[in-house]
Image: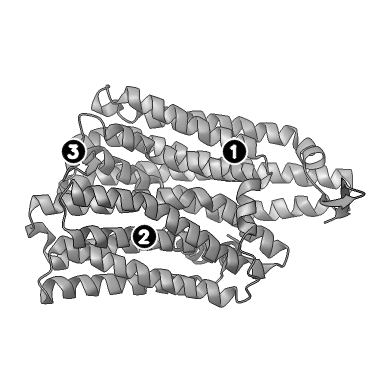
Amino acid sequence: MAGIGFELKKLFKTTSVVQKLRGSLYAAMTTIGPLILIIVTLFLMYFFLGYADILFSSKDILASTILYVFIFSLCSTAPFNAVLSRYIADKIYENCEQDILPSYYAGLGFNIVFSSIFGTIFCLWEFFVGKVDAFYVFSSFCMYITLVFVFYTMLYITAIKEFKKISYSFVTGMLVALILAVILVKLFGVLVELGIVVGFAVGFLVTGFCLCGLVRQYFKENSRNYREVFDYFKEHWRLLLTNTFYIFGLYVHNFVFWTSDMQIIVVKSFVSAPVYDMATCIAMFINVSAMVIFIVEVETNFHEKYQNYCQTLIGGTGEDIAYAKSAMFRSIRNEIFFTMQLQVIFTICLFFICLLTMPFLSISGMIMTILPTLAVAYFAIFIMYAMIIFIYYFNVYDKAVASAAIFFGVTFVGSILAKYFTPNLYGLGVLFGAFAGLTYAFYALRSIEKNLDYYIFCKGKITKQVIGIKYGHKIYENTAI
């Protein structure tokens, strides 16, 4: 996030209202901008290709394909993000940027193979059991893999400051997707659902190659040290575990309701609960602004306090260290409560907008009954994740793992029970899970604040340990970092 932080500090440097609005817009475009572009492209495809006139069976297959592609491409890439972010940050700090490009290639290869295994199994089932057209199955698989490519590469480009070029990459890819889909359907008579899937597959591939080009342009040197990044996964496995629990906690309640009375099965392959899934999607969008607010606050306020504290540890007096520590944790409290206060306003306003506009979009009834509980739940989820990010700063990974694990476990068990409740209480499982994880993360931060000296001076490493062999025995020597 260093690049985003650098730009935001410039945009928020003055107190001008226009400048602050520019900063907020910039943060929004760098965090949720790509997702908005994809959604806009999908709606344009529906409009230009006559989606309303196709068979209901074709609509079900297309909707199920898009749902599965986005959920499972995210589930197969997101767990690795925390470890890779740590690796990239460490290499930039150590001025070893030549190691970043080989880690990108090695991680990309592993991620593609890992994702392809599960994707291939499902596609074989879809073809042989679901009797879906082979070319459609292959195209949906390509769409899935190319989106994995894009999601993975997005992690690396957060270190690059050319965010305009990143936006251009997505605009280019989505334009290619839209134009290709229109050509295939209107000129060559391809089925609408197949044209959309092929268009997105090619569009994501174009976006991925553009983003990959930016990574190669920025990190030009290649040390060919392909194995070191895998050693990071061994060393920082708790980061991997935290992100895994968090990502699956986001969707496990959906998976549970896929087995409820709301379940539908499309071509004996796709299992989902469209009503509950739509309510979940709306709830996420209502609260996604929390992450934008959080990024703005952390990158423009907290990060400076954190750097100041780290600098006082080297040569500062005890009084300086205590003052810097106090300022840092005061900043954490301010950022969390400011994010909560502002997001409450946004959530209430957006919820009432949904109440007024959704009936005109034929979205009402059961969806609007389920939505309120889920909206509150996702508000708590995003605040919990913000606290986990702060825990990451102090390298207390055990507490981060525990927060995410509690969130996942309570959500899973609670959702199993909640599916037998009335519709307005269907979201109680994820709501209880979110508040359980949030509560633990809050008290974990309080504990870190009280015992920070222990974590820094007793558990932290201020020297680098070197292992060697002398007279046939292992020796350990401490050298200054």
Which label was assigned to residue 264? Answer: 3
Q: Which residue is pictured at 69% across the width and 56% down the height?
A: 304
User: Which residue position holds label 1?
Assistant: 400
In the rendered image, residue 391, in percent from the top left (x then y), is placed at: 63, 41
In the rendered image, residue 269, in percent from the top left (x then y), is placed at: 22, 44
Give the amino acid at mark 3: Ile
Instruction: Determine whether the residue tagged by mark 2 lies in a helix, strand or loop.
Output: helix
Give the amino acid at mark 1: Ala
In the rendered image, residue 473, in percent from the top left (x then y), is placed at: 88, 45
Relative placement, left or right, of 148 versus 104 is left
Q: Earlier in the sequence, mark 2 or mark 1?
A: 2
In the image, 71 versus 2, the foreground residue is 71
Residue farthest to the front, as pictured: 472
Asked whether the beta carbons under mark 2 and mark 1 sit within 8 Å of each other, the answer is: no
Q: Is residue 310 visible?
A: yes
The alpha-carbon separation of the residues under discs 3 and 2 comes to 25 Å
Circle 2 crowding by C-alpha within 10 Å: few under 14, some 14–19, many from 20: many
